[in-house]
């Protein structure tokens, strides 16, 4: 076995290793993108429920115009956010306005008993649970992707091909607390 053969074997092993690392990075990148898509789907569902919820509450609490405008503005901002960081901030603001909306609903016993309101509340709660599950799935994939692009030897291939770390989609601080809602 000559020196040329050894060099060829080493080159083949290095190229095969680089291809394996590249394919692993692409696989993880696609998983992160898929997970982000899941979050987008759930947030769109949430955004679609909000106008119905606001209209239902409006029927009972007509003098709460300023609150309805805040909810609508927060929804618009959340729908326009692009990056995980922007979405996180906008969704947290939207969650705060929705909490205010539900607090107002506490003052209207007829509204709390309204079937449409109860169904919208149930759907929104279900959607919030799905958003949290999607967020966990996304953050797990982001963690795996970020670890892969930061560890040796895959960091060399990731750096050469401009793979960049992804942002986590963190929960609002108040979402980390146990909330007791009673209607």
Image (cartoon, rainbow, N blue to C red):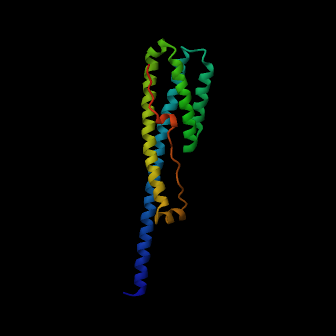
Q: Position of residue 89 (x, y in %)?
A: 57, 38
Can residue 82 be seen?
no
Vertical position of residue 152 compared to residue 52: above or below = below
- Residue lying at the far front of the rendered structure: 177
Residue at (48, 48) in percent of width and height: 33
Seen as rendered, the residue at the extreme bottom is: 2
Q: Position of residue 81 (x, y in %)?
A: 58, 40
Q: Where is residue 108 in the image (x, y as percent from the top left)?
A: 51, 13
Residue 35 in view, yes or no: yes
**Residue at (44%, 38%) from the top-left corner?**
132
**Residue depicted at x 43% and y 21%:** 182
In the rendered view, tell whether residue 104 sits above or below residue 86. Answer: above
Classify the position of the N terminus by image quarter.
bottom left
Place of residue 173 in the rendered image (x, y in percent of width and height, measured from the top left): 51, 37
Q: Residue furthest left?
A: 1
Q: For the C terminus, which image quadrant? A: top left
Compared with 79, 56 (above or below) is above
Q: Taking 152 as reference, is 140 above or below it?
A: above
Give the mark count: 0
Q: Nearer the viewer, residue 162 or 150?
A: 150
Instruction: Name the residue at the top extreme.
Output: 110
């Amino acid at each position: 076995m000559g020196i040329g053969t050894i060099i060829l074997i080493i080159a083949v092993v290095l190229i095969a290793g680089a291809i394996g690392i590249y394919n692993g990075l692409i696989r993880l990148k696609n998983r992160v993108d898929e997970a982000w898509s899941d979050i987008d789907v759930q947030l769109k569902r949430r955004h679609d429920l909000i106008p119905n919820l606001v209209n239902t509450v409006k029927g009972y609490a007509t003098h709460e115009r300023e609150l309805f405008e805040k909810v609508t503005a927060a929804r618009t901002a959340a729908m326009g956010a692009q990056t995980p960081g922007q979405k996180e901030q906008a969704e947290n603001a939207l969650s705060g306005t929705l909490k205010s909306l539900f607090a107002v609903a506490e003052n209207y016993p007829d509204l709390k008993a309204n079937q449409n309101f109860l169904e919208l509340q149930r759907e929104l709660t279900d959607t919030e649970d799905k958003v949290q599950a999607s967020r966990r799935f996304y953050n797990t994939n982001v963690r795996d992707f970020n670890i892969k692009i930061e560890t040796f030897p895959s960091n060399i291939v990731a750096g050469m091909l401009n793979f960049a770390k992804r942002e986590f989609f963190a929960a609002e601080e108040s979402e980390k607390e146990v909330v007791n809602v009673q209607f």
